[in-house]
Amino acid sequence: MNLDRRTFIRNSGKGILGLSAISTLPLFAGNESIAKTSAGLFFKISLAEWSLNKTLFSGKLKNMDFPAKAKNDFGIHAVEYVNQFFKDKANDEAYLKELKSRTADLGVKNVLIMIDGEGHLADEDAAKRTKSIENHYKWVEAAKFLGCHSIRVNAYATSKNTEEGKAAAVDGLSRLTDFAQPYGINIIVENHGGFSSNGIWLTDVMKQVNKPSCGTLPDFGNFCITRGPGGCTEEYDKYKGVKEMMPYAKGVSAKSGVFDAEGNEVNIDYMKMLKIVKDAGYTGHIGIESESKIDEDEAIKLTKALLEKVGKMIS
């Protein structure tokens, strides 16, 4: 990235703090006091772009129009982007300006960007790990410009040895966090397969990184450690895993897939999950991330209704 673009990222945007100011602010995005919770809830609701992945991949919806759809179709005023849907735009100043302008006009908050396809931050090969770290730099800069609080990254370890994988993850996350800290951007890790779906392994990584702006994004459903030809062959207890990850959480992902006639998620006890989240003192955004075989819009509406119903019962 050249000097001109660094200056653009640092200085552009009405009302955005410069790096010298923002670096002194606490990065507790999961409990930000300036944003009001949804009416009657202890948390705020956001929409993860992956919930609309089929529509986006088909070309029926563009990333630029995602925030308007979140607000107009679902009444959701906070969005979580997926870099796959604008992967060539991280360095496109005009594109980022337009996206930021649209969300400002809509009154929609840009929460985070989920990063995939940029290499393994826990690659056992040191050179590949460094390349992956550097690949994430542009997304840190884009997230800062858009006003996000975090980028979600993967800590998938290429080594089959748990300790070697852990050491690689600690190194990759520590170095990326150090780069992102002056931008006021958190680096948050989702349980996303392999060792990262083991709550104890991931929280031990967090303890060793030991940086305030490196945290977790517990996902209610991504706890498959090992997959075989027939599906998941080793699965971590989802409730145990979320509870272990919550002390480091700067975001939460409400996975959904199958619903019963009453609108409850068949495979995830939302009452149990939301109690775990609430007991951890979390008041930030919970992002809807549906992966249902039914219509995507309908799945989002069902997940939102479930979050609101259960949330109001325990708030």
Image: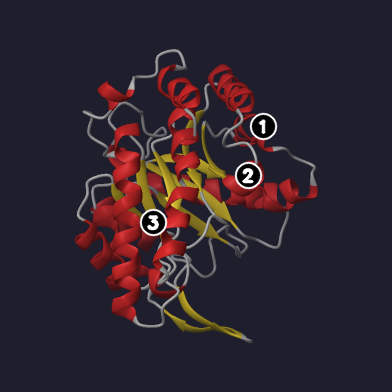
**To which residue does mark 2 refer?**
87
Choose mark 3 or mark 2, whichever is in front.
Answer: 2
Tell which of 264 and 184 is nearer to you: 184
Left or right of 306 on screen, residue 26: left
Picture disc at residue 292? none
Picture disc at residue 64? 1
Q: Residue at x 65, y 41 (%)?
A: 88
Q: Quadrant of residue 184?
A: top left
Q: Quadrant of residue 10?
A: top left
Provide residue 92's location: percent of width, then percent of height: 61, 30
In this picture, is 68 found above or below 239? above
Secondary element under disc 2, as helix, strand or loop, is loop
Q: Residues within 10 Å of mark 1 (few under 14, many from 20)?
A: some
Q: Residue at x 37, y 76 (%)?
A: 237
**To which residue does mark 3 refer?**
189
Q: Residue at x 34, y 19 (%)?
A: 17
In this picture, is 145 found above or below 235? above
Q: CA distance from mark 2 to mark 1?
A: 12 Å
Q: Earlier in the sequence, mark 2 or mark 1?
A: 1
* Residue 42 visible in this rendered orientation of the protein: no
Residue type at numbered disc 1: Met
Q: Residues within 10 Å of mark 3 (few under 14, many from 20)?
A: many
